[in-house]
Image (cartoon, grey):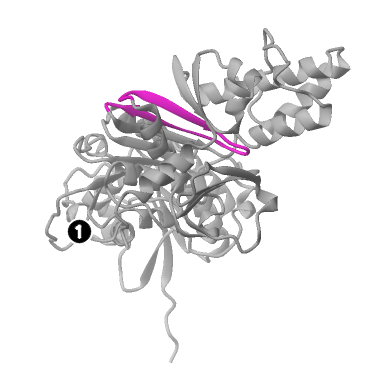
């Protein structure tokens, strides 16, 4: 069975009949006729035979990967952020911010490419910009550079501000599990003012696996 | 032979029963201004109301801009909201027709059979909103066992109601509407803690505070607010909540 998490920037695809793990590809490189058996994400309804809601996939994936009764799972995507909070093994709260969390992952990647920055080499700054989304935060970088900051330092403060915004959106927990490609960004992960457990970018695929094992409602 | 033109009377909120009895007649047509009555951009209301304002009341103003009304009765008391109170002032200054502000404090309950019966949620809310133009109670309907709850006002965008199962019970101000006691705060705050419930409010409405408060106290709750139309994130949240609460399957 072909499972797919159709993200805005990247698609995560898993063929459950093959031994190898999931593959990641840029969404723009996806063949026009590609069709998954079960999928989630913004293109799921158009590119799959059966699709499930992203929050549902996130929750089911978290349930399998975290293995705790009480936890908060935050997914930071290319253009939105979403979270589910479990208590006593049940989802008791959730949120999806496609407006104020807009374009944060996308912007972080764009900045690295534009300024030629390796996030693995940047220390977490002592302070961050007060920003609410990737787009609105850009001007802070320009202002900081004009005021004498290095580009790398300004971008680091931007990333820290983005992480703080995501943390607050998730309800300012003491500990959170993180999902999404930004798990591989040590500056982003280190910018959260709480304990972070990175789960990687395949949490929603794991949620699809869990859904696959459920009976088909049709 | 000339047909006598019916008097077009617009209402906002739930008029007091005594007012409704007075204005209902074969010679009058009652138009619910809270509901979209015309196809036109809400931006046309910008000269009269801030753009960041309750979508229901912006709809009221949009309607009056397009309908050739003869009179308006607008409820402005605890059974509606302070925003309506100020819209009443604006309507008086905008229009050359009588704009009568009412304060519905009716306390005789008409019952809530529609809120508790098995029926598509969209149909339930349509029946409830239609009943503001009637002095009659709803016909008796058998109650069903609730599997989900919808708390709140009738939304500006009814499309979110299609996400719920037929066994959804209705709470909040919509229940007060059916009961014809729109100022009954105790009834408005009534919920069933056993039932996973979506607490809905229009963005920029004072009821967002009550919706959030009740949702925080409810063991299986989701708070959502939306403005003119429900975006994909609002729909996704409701879908996921109902599915993860075991209310219904979420596969599409």
Q: For label 1, count other residues whose C-alpha is less than 10 Å away and answer few (under 14), some (14-19) or many (20+).
A: many
Q: Is residue B2 above or below residue B247?
A: below
Q: Nearer the viewer, residue B20 or A86?
A: A86
Task: Identify the residue at horizontal 20%, vertical 61% (top origin).
Answer: B136
For this view, does B50 lie left or right of residue B23? right
For this view, does B114 lie left or right of residue A124? left
For this view, does B250 lie left or right of residue A36? left
Residue receiving disc 1: B118
Name the quadrant containing residue B81. Answer: top left
Q: Is residue B238 above or below residue B97?
A: above
Task: Identify the residue at horizontal 16%, vertical 47% (top origin).
Answer: B109
Q: Chain of mark 1?
A: B
Q: Is residue B26 above or below residue A39?
A: below
Q: In the image, which residues are magenta?
A: A68-88
> Quarter holding the C terminus of chain A?
bottom left
Q: Is residue A138 above or below residue A202?
A: above
Residue A122 x/y as whole percent: 73, 15
Residue B29 x/y as whole percent: 38, 69
Task: State yes or no: residue A74 in magenta.
Answer: yes
Q: Main secondary structure of the magenta part?
A: strand
Q: Nearer the viewer, residue A38 or B77?
A: A38
Task: Identify the residue at horizontal 21%, vertical 35% (top origin).
Answer: B193
Task: Identify the residue at horizontal 55%, vertical 25% (top origin).
Answer: A166
């Amino acid at each position: 069975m072909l499972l797919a998490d159709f993200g805005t920037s990247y698609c995560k695809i898993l063929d459950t009949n093959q031994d190898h793990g999931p593959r990641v590809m840029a969404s723009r490189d996806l063949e026009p006729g590609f069709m998954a058996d079960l999928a989630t994400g913004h293109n799921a309804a158009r590119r799959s035979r059966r699709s499930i809601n992203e929050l549902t996939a996130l929750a089911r994936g978290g349930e399998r990967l975290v293995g705790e009764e009480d936890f908060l799972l935050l997914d930071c995507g290319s253009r939105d952020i979403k979270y589910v909070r479990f208590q006593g093994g049940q989802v008791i709260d959730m949120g999806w911010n496609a407006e104020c969390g807009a374009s944060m992952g996308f912007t972080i990647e764009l900045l690295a490419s534009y300024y030629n920055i390796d996030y693995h080499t940047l220390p977490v700054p002592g302070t961050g910009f007060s920003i609410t989304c990737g787009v609105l935060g850009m001007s802070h970088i320009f202002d900081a550079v004009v005021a004498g900051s290095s580009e790398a330092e300004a971008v680091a403060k931007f990333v820290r501000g983005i992480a703080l915004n995501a943390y607050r959106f998730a309800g300012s927990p003491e500990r959170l599990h993180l999902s999404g490609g930004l798990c591989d960004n040590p500056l982003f992960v280190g910018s959260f003012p709480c304990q972070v457990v990175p789960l990687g970018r395949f949490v929603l695929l794991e949620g699809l696996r869990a859904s696959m094992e459920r009976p088909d409602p049709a | 032979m000339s047909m006598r033109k019916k008097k077009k009377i617009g209402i906002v909120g739930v008029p007091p029963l005594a007012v409704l009895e007075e204005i209902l007649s074969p010679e009058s047509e009652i138009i619910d201004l809270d509901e979209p009555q015309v196809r036109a951009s809400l931006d046309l209301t910008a000269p009269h109301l801030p753009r960041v304002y309750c979508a229901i009341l912006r709809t009221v103003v949009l309607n009056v801009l397009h309908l050739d009304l003869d009179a308006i009765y607008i409820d402005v008391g605890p059974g509606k909201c302070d925003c309506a109170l100020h819209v009443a002032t604006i309507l008086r200054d905008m229009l050359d027709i009588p704009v009568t502000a009412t304060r519905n404090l009716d306390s005789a309950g008409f019952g809530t059979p529609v809120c508790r019966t098995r029926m598509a949620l969209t149909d339930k809310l349509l029946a409830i909103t239609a009943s503001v133009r009637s002095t009659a109670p709803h016909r008796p309907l058998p109650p069903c066992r609730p599997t989900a709850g919808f708390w709140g006002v009738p939304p500006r965008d009814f499309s979110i109601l299609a996400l719920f199962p037929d066994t959804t019970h209705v709470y909040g101000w919509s229940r007060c509407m059916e009961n014809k006691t729109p100022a009954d705060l105790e009834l408005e705050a009534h919920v069933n803690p056993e039932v996973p419930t979506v607490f809905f409010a229009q963005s920029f409405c004072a009821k967002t505070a009550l919706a959030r408060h009740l949702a925080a106290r409810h063991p299986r709750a989701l708070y959502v607010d939306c403005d003119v139309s429900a975006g994909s994130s609002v729909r996704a949240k409701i879908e996921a909540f109902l599915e993860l609460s075991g209310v219904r399957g979420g596969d599409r």
